[in-house]
Amino acid sequence: MGILKSNCQTFEEKFLIQWVDCFKEIVSILIILHVLKYPTSLIQYDYSKKFGIDVPSFSHFREHELDLFRKLIKKDEYNFISELCLNQQEVIEFNNFLESMPTMTEDQVDVESHIILTGNSRLF
């Protein structure tokens, strides 16, 4: 119900803004919980260098998702969470694993793309 007319539903900008603010707060809390559960999600890495176009599904955030996360929470909160997560042994080991993998060449990525797009493992 609106404030202006108690017996009629009305659109009031104030309440829409309040709803959006509350929604942003809930989303930021959920993202923080995700990051605390999966600290490797904060690793900033170009996964395509190691996996080509077939990047496995794991809890990492892509660059644009990390940017949105940074915008949703306060800078000092992000710095605290980031420091907390990135210093965990699990994250350090995962980083070492990524670095130990060979980097894919452009030809390997092209072959992978062809196989995925056509379903045919024969070369061009």
Image (spheres, grey):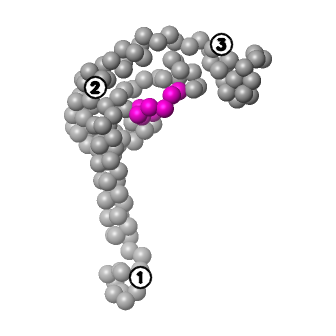
Q: Is label 2 in contact with label 1 (beta carbons under 8 Å)?
A: no
Side of 119 where 36 appears, left or right: left
Q: Is the magenta stretch mostly helix, strand or loop?
A: loop
Crowdedness near tag 2: few (<14), some (14–19) or many (≥20) residues, C-alpha within 10 Å: some
* Closer to the camera in the image, 102 or 24: 102
Mark 2 — residue? Answer: 86
Q: Is residue 36 above or below residue 103?
A: below
Mark 3 — residue? Answer: 107
Q: Residue 9: which disc?
A: 1
Side of 37 where 114 appears, left or right: right
CA separation, marks 2 and 1? 49 Å
CA separation, marks 3 and 1? 61 Å
> In front of the other: label 2 or label 1?
2
Side of 24 where 111 appears, left or right: right
- In the picture, which quadrant includes the C terminus? top right
Query: How many numbered circles does the render carry?
Result: 3
Crowdedness near tag 1: few (<14), some (14–19) or many (≥20) residues, C-alpha within 10 Å: few
- Report x, y in % for residue 88: 25, 24
Q: Callout 3, which amino acid?
A: Asp
- Report x, y in % for residue 62: 45, 33
CA separation, marks 2 and 3? 33 Å
Q: What element carries label 1?
A: loop
Please report the bounds of the magenta region as a residue range. Answer: 55-63
- The quarter of the picture where residue 92 lies is top left
Q: What element carries label 2?
A: helix
> In front of the other: label 3 or label 1?
3
- In the picture, which quadrant includes the N terminus? bottom left
Q: Is mark 3 on a helix, strand or loop?
A: helix
Identify the residue shown where x is 41% and y is 80%.
10
Q: Callout 1, which amino acid?
A: Gln
Identify the residue shown where x is 47% and y is 12%.
101
